[in-house]
Amino acid sequence: MWLRVLGSAAGGGFPQWNCDCPCCRAARDGSRPCRPRTQSSLAVSADRHRWYVLNASPDIRAQIESFPALRPRQGRESPVAAVLLTDAELDHTLGLLLLREARRIRLYATESTWQVLCAGTGIPCTLERYCDVEWRPVVPGVEEPLGDGLSYRAFDVPTTKRPRFATGIGEGRVIGYRLTDARTRRSAVYVPGMQRLTEDVRAEFDGCVCLLVDGTCWSDGELTELGLADKTARSMGHLPIQDSLRQLAPLPVERKVYVHLNNTNPVLLEDSPQRRLVEEHGMEVAEDGLEIEVR
C-alpha cells in the first residue's frame, strides 16, 4: 500500500494569504528554512494505479497536477476512484466542487457529515447539477472493503468543537480511518483532526505501521499569543503537539507523522527548537509530496 501526502497544511495553507505571522513571513522572504504547503489531503493506493483521496481540499487541482499518478490517462479517465471524508470542514470538502467535471463522484462520509454537506454547505446539491454523486455511508467501527485490495475501518474521534451548522452534531462528526492492505494485512491510520487522545482512539493505532496524526498547533494558546485570534487549539478541535508528543512518541509504530499543520505552527520552521524536539522524539513533520510505502 502506498500513501502520498497531497497537502500537509491546515485550512488556509502555508503561507496563509492574510497572515503575517513569523512562519508565514519566513515562507515569503526566505529568512528561515521552511517549505510552502497546500491544504490537508492524502491519497492511498494498493497498486499505484487507482487512488483513493482522503479529504478534497480547495487545492486539489494543484495537488493532482503535482503528482503524475493522479493525472488522467486516456481522455478523461481519472485514477481517482473515490473521496473519503473525515468531516465536513470546508478545507476538506470545497475541493469536491473542483471535481465537478467528473461523470460520477463516489463519496464516503458518515451520516453526520452528509447532513452537514446537504443541509449546511449545500455542496452535494451543487455537484449534482454537474455530475452524479454516489454517497457511500460510513459507519464507524465497521470494516468495509474499499476496492482494489484495500479496506477501511472508520472510528469516531470525539469533539466538543462548536459546529458551524446546526446539522450533523452527533456521532461521526469527526472520524479517522484505518486503511488496510488486504494482501499484507498491514495498516495505516489517518486522523487529521483529534481534540483528545482517548483510550478508544488510542486503541485504533494498535498494530498499524504508519500513523498520520493531527499536528495543527504546537501549543494550545498559539493563536492568542500571536494576537491572531481568540481561539485555542482545543476549541478548534485539535490537540496541540505539546500535549500529544509525549503520548504518541512511545507508541511502537514504524512511522509517526504530524499532518494538518497550521500556518502559525513553529514546527514548520526547519531550524526551530520545536521542530528539533519533534524529530528527537522519533516523529516526523509532513510536507507536500511525502510518500510512504506500507509493507
Image (cartoon, rainbow, N blue to C red):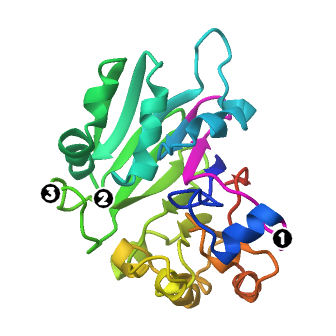
Crowding near the residue tagged with mark 3, few <14, some 14–19, many ≥20 C-alpha atoms within 10 Å: few
> Is residue 291 shown above or below 260?
above
Viewer can see residue 203: yes
Tell me where residue 165 appears, x and y as whole percent.
20, 55
The part of the chain drawn in magenta is 30-51
Q: Nearer the viewer, mark 1 or mark 2?
A: 1
> Is residue 23 shown above or below 27?
below
Of residue 80 and residue 268, the one placed in the foreground of this image is 268
Viewer can see residue 152: no
Crowding near the residue tagged with mark 1, few <14, some 14–19, many ≥20 C-alpha atoms within 10 Å: few
Q: Could you tell me how far apart the alpha carbons at marks 3 and 2 are, in whole angstroms?
A: 25 Å
For residue 166, the mark is 3
Residue at (37%, 72%) from the top-left corner? Answer: 237
Tell me where residue 134 appears, x and y as whole percent.
31, 27
- Please tell me whether the stretch drawn in magenta is mainly helix, strand or loop: loop
Residue bearing the label numbered 2: 141
Q: Nearer the viewer, mark 3 or mark 2?
A: 3
Identified by mark 1, the residue type is Pro
Tell me where residue 196 appears, x and y as whole percent.
38, 80
Of residue 279 and residue 254, the one placed in the foreground of this image is 279
Label 3 residue SS: loop
Label 1 residue SS: loop
Q: Could you tell me how far apart the alpha carbons at marks 1 and 2 are, in whole angstroms?
A: 41 Å
Tell me where residue 139 appears, x and y as whole percent.
26, 50
For residue 5, the mark is none
Quadrant location, the C terminus? bottom right
Q: Is residue 50 left or right of residue 228?
A: right
For residue 33, the mark is 1
Residue at (65%, 31%) from the top-left corner? Answer: 70
